[in-house]
């Protein structure tokens, strides 16, 4: 499956029925981190939870045949750029004691001098293929 570089956030949610419409709730943290703004319109992609499906499902067969015909997939580009400002929540502490935040597709941003649970505004100072480094420019936004 190919994921757009325009992906703003990724979360799991149930679809519920409310009066005569179906509702997918956006977690509060997505609004608070600045990824999504209330009142704005967004494109939404729904992906089923395949954890219970067997290996012969049509979805899996289709994606295998597409990957064979298109050749080797190119390596995905990092979802951040140097100089970019991001709002992140530190989820973990790395082996060197730095904060670790994750953004689109689980891409890691290392945040020196940050603690677990902190929500910080960072400027991306270094970008590698599998991680970036962000310098805190505002704490507890």
Image (cartoon, helix red, strand yellow):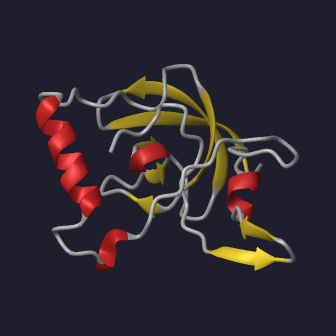
Is residue 76 rendered to the left or right of residue 135?
Answer: left
Number of numbered discs on residues: 0
Q: Position of residue 136 (x, y in %)?
A: 61, 38
Q: In this orientation, which residue lies closer to the viewer: 9 or 132?
A: 9
Asked where in the image residue 58 lies, by quadrant, the reply is bottom left
Q: Which image quarter is the N terminus in?
A: top left
For image coordinates 42% across by 51% down, the residue present is 98
For image coordinates 32% across by 75% down, the residue present is 51
For image coordinates 48% across by 29% down, the residue present is 80
Is residue 42 rendered to the left or right of residue 98?
Answer: right
Q: Position of residue 61 (x, y in %)?
A: 19, 55
Is residue 29 rendered to the left or right of residue 132?
Answer: right
Q: In this orientation, which residue lies closer to the viewer: 80 or 14?
A: 14
Q: Give the answer, above or below, for where 90 lies relative to 39.
A: below
Asked where in the image residue 107 lies, by quadrant, the reply is top left
Q: Give the answer, above or below, for where 120 lies relative to 73.
A: below
Q: In this orientation, which residue lies closer to the viewer: 29 or 109?
A: 29
Q: Position of residue 129 (x, y in %)?
A: 29, 30
Give the residue furthest to the top. Answer: 83
Q: Position of residue 49 (x, y in %)?
A: 41, 70
For image coordinates 47% across by 50% down, the residue present is 102
Q: Give the answer, above or below, for where 113 lies relative to 49.
A: above
């Amino acid at each position: 499956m190919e994921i757009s570089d325009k992906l703003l956030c990724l979360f799991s949610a149930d679809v519920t029925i409310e009066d005569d419409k179906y509702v997918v709730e956006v977690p509060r943290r997505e609004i608070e981190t600045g990824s999504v703004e209330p009142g704005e319109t967004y494109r939404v992609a729904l992906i089923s939870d395949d954890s219970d499906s067997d290996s012969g499902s049509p979805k899996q067969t289709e994606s295998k045949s597409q990957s064979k015909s298109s050749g080797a997939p190119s390596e995905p580009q990092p979802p951040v750029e140097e100089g970019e400002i991001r709002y992140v929540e530190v989820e973990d502490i790395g082996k060197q004691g730095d904060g670790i935040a994750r953004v689109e597709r689980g891409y890691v941003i290392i945040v020196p001098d940050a603690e677990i649970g902190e929500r910080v505004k960072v400027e991306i100072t270094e970008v590698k293929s599998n991680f970036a480094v962000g310098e805190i420019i505002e704490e507890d936004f």
